[in-house]
Amino acid sequence: MSKRISFLLSYLIIAITSFSQINKYGIPFITNYSLRDYDAGEQNWAIVQDHRGIMYFGNNDGCVLEYDGVTWRKIPIANNSIVRSLAVDSSGIIYVGAVGDFGYLNPDKIGELQYISLTGNLDSIEQGFTNVWKTYATGQGIYF
């Protein structure tokens, strides 16, 4: 009887483990990046991808991180504040919401994106805000 039970138990263990093999189809590729890889703060609050496939990360270190799949680049925010939200519109413009600031990324003369603040367009009484937690790019406009 004990031989029969041990055979049955062995058969069940082999059958169960053979069905629990990792499915090699459909498993996403995951790469983890350390602080040394992108040389910025440890917290990223927002992520968007533009129409070219470039990734942008709202970072704790007062910048937007730009990643093209090979190179990381920091795009500093005017008041060096934490970037809390990002959005991309249909034309590919990246909008940025930060602590006490909001604006967008615009290419300079050589094509590198630079941060342009829009808070200067506000009346001085309206400039006392803190976190811009959400940024939306819609067909009707941009909302911070």
Image: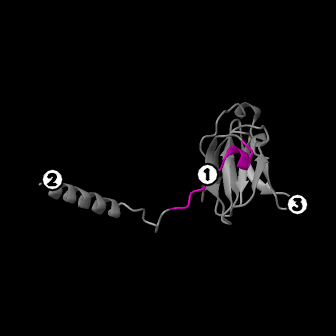
Marks 3 and 2 sit apart, C-alpha to C-alpha, by 81 Å
Element type where label 2 sits in the image: helix
- Residue 64 in sight from this viewpoint: no
- Name the residue that disc number 1 marks: 32
Q: Earlier in the sequence, mark 2 or mark 1?
A: 2
- Name the residue that disc number 2 marks: 2
C-beta proximity under 8 Å, tags 1 and 3:
no
Element type where label 3 sits in the image: loop
Disc number at residue 84?
A: none
Would you identify the image quadrant in which residue 131 lies? top right
Region in magenta: 28-40
C-beta proximity under 8 Å, tags 3 and 2:
no
Residue 120 x %, y %: 79, 41
- Name the residue that disc number 3 marks: 109
Amino acid at pointer 3: Lys
Quarter of the figure that contains the C terminus: top right
Q: Of tags 1 and 3, which is closer to the observer?
A: 1
